[in-house]
Image (cartoon, coloured by chain):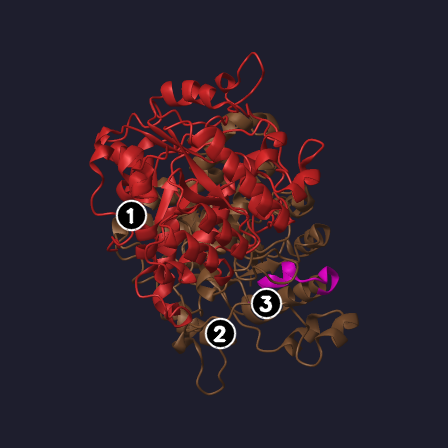
Chain colours: A brown, B red
Amino acid sequence: MAVSSAPRPASLDESAAKLHLIDTDVHNDLPSYAELKPFLAKEWHPWIENGGPFSAERAYANTGPGIMVDAVREEDGLCAGDPDWVVKQLMQKYRIDLGVLTGTLIGASVQHNAQAWAALSSAYNDWTLAKWVWPYPCFKGSILVAGQDPEGAAREIRRLGREPGMVQVLMASAARIPYGNRLYWPLYRAAVAHDLPVAIHVGAEGTGLANPPTSVGYPSSYLEFHTDHSQTMMGHCVSLVAEGVFAQFPTLRFGFIEGGICWAPYVLGRLDRMYPALKAEVPYLTKLPSEYVLGHCYFSTQPIEEPDDHAHLLRMLAMLRAEETVIFASDYPHWDFDNPLTAFASFPPALRRRIFVDNVLAFYGPRLLQSHQ
Amino acid sequence: MAVSSAPRPASLDESAAKLHLIDTDVHNDLPSYAELKPFLAKEWHPWIENGGPFSAERAYANTGPGIMVDAVREEDGLCAGDPDWVVKQLMQKYRIDLGVLTGTLIGASVQHNAQAWAALSSAYNDWTLAKWVWPYPCFKGSILVAGQDPEGAAREIRRLGREPGMVQVLMASAARIPYGNRLYWPLYRAAVAHDLPVAIHVGAEGTGLANPPTSVGYPSSYLEFHTDHSQTMMGHCVSLVAEGVFAQFPTLRFGFIEGGICWAPYVLGRLDRMYPALKAEVPYLTKLPSEYVLGHCYFSTQPIEEPDDHAHLLRMLAMLRAEETVIFASDYPHWDFDNPLTAFASFPPALRRRIFVDNVLAFYGPRLLQSHQ
């Protein structure tokens, strides 16, 4: 499987050499919907009054620890809701140079009322810039979009596409329709026009207008719900390749965040096995399916799988070409946070460097290093 | 991960030593619904007149070769519909000692009318015995059940549970509700009472009362549909473990047929990672999730993944403890048939022996070797 080098920059900026660690998944919190009012179109104000808009929240209660204990500030109970606190408790404590904010409203793209959530996402994006990104050189933002309305999402991408503080388009992996479908192509066209990668993040499966969390229906426990997360990722990955998204948009980079990584070798092997016999269906593809995946897709580490035999993980990473496709994520402040100082201690240093810095830069492109102040 | 040895017999029958190859997935065909009439309760006859009952057929057209050319008999166009023909074209040609019949009505368990399909499944099972199993020592049958009505399925299992020609319970992997759910436990109780393993087989995803083929909705192509098959398998596997099916039924053996195998290491790793933090939800589990999977689950080879680097496949098999969990399947007469004489040529002989014979015997238990004539 020859890897397409098209979407990966040939050389990295010199300033990259100074970086040691970039976190692609920092969940900064919105303490109150009232904070969005200054950014939200007036017509939607009544909708967020009385504590916030109705949203189809996660249906599975996490019976585990939930939030990292040291992420909660004792005096006000605020968790990841204050930028200075996150700088101290995450960025400084774990020596992270740059953090990409993924927030707490990723489920916007599976809420029933797409118009309302498009307005709310716009306000949220402006709030992210004003409160988190512009005052802090260490934070970069995501353009949250209500992807169930791809034309609307494209407008939001064009509105913020020139903002150097925004480094990706973000939506839920939960969905009603697989992301390769042509319905979404306006969204990809806008992202590519601004050289923005598109990232999808787990967590809203089975809510709003999304399908049940598995293709066999609703599981019974959060343990299942969480383990099953990778299935939305797999469905989208197969769809993106088979529908020809990467053939149509040769510079598009796609990120799979918090959905695990060790499912990818399986998908590559199975797609490549089936493709030769079923080419007639997908005549617009000009490469092996695995080449599209390895050339366009990036997979975040958290939660990194922990097989009993650690060598298995390294073998899986090799099958996935981790030296070009895997990017670091902490998932701060969530319970299954991966501590970058320990979780990767056994990785070869060169691979760690690729996962912590080089691949992350390749995924986001040059704007990650551009000043936004 | 210590493997539970409970459901695997400690020693194999001496006659097993004479066997060289057992095929766990032979799709014998029903040439016409009229053949079922002698076995079908009178009240349902009108329902199968005019060519057969309505059934929610597969929604994705296979644009590939479909059926193996040499499986079709020239003079009458019959494909795998005549036992003598299958003996000649499959069993003798590939030197297969025993073939487990999986038929063509596996989607029974996702058809809307459970009562009607329970009746049809019963007739089909009796037809299988009369036409295929009893006259041919090389064929064993599956008890097809309409699993959407687990109490009804349990009755069918009890009706045929003492028949030595029937070696497993069979239903679709497509489902409305994951198979760990307590709704299905009457079915498992009946299977265990007769020491019959339960097998699920892909193909009906997105039809009848099943969910869409992926947890993000309907894909567009058969290439996707086929690649996504493993997702139903994963959902059920996680559900069976997490709901405590294997804790409740310590002798239950579960087979995943035609859903691929290389997804399993990923699921094991992810479940084991999450379990310690989420134990509170599943207090009835007394082992690591991976121990339940490795101790109770069997995975059929076809279609075996074919990564570019063949060493990857062998590494995956090691992670999955293939020497105890993988069983051979040809999928005759379907297009992606795995030829046992060539597809496994590069496997170590000891592993091949386990996959071709020993694991298959462990899965079906002693009745596979019992005479049914």
Q: Mark 1 points at which residue?
A: A312
Magenta-colored span: A104-116
* Mark 3 nearby-residue class (10 Å; few <14, some 14–19, many ≥20): many
Q: Mark 3 points at which residue?
A: A128
Picture quarter containing residue A108?
bottom right
Q: Do the residues labelled 3 and 2 touch (CB within 8 Å)?
A: no
Q: Disc 1 marks which amino acid?
A: His
Q: In which quarter of the image is the N terminus of chain B?
A: bottom left
Q: Does mark 2 fall on the same chain as mark 3? A: yes
Q: Disc 3 marks which amino acid?
A: Thr
Q: Reply yes or no: does residue A111 show up in magenta.
A: yes
* Mark 1 nearby-residue class (10 Å; few <14, some 14–19, many ≥20): many
Residue sitting nearer the eye, A170 or B123:
B123
With respect to residue B241, does A286 lie above or below?
above
Task: Give the mark toward the camera: 2 or 1.
Answer: 1
**Helix, strand or loop at mark 2:** loop
Counting from the top left corner in percent of width and height, residue A320 is at: 39, 42
**Helix, strand or loop at mark 3:** helix
Q: Does mark 1 fall on the same chain as mark 3? A: yes
**Helix, strand or loop at mark 1:** helix
Which secondary structure class fits the magenta region best?
helix
With respect to residue A329, does A320 lie above or below?
above
Q: Disc 2 marks which amino acid?
A: Ala
Q: Which residue lies furthest to the bottom in this view?
A: A75
Sequence order check, earlier mark of 3 and 1: 3
Chain of the residue displaying label 1: A
Sequence order check, earlier mark of 2 and 1: 2
Q: Name the residue under label 2.
A: A80
Chain of the residue displaying label 2: A
Picture quarter containing residue B18?
top left
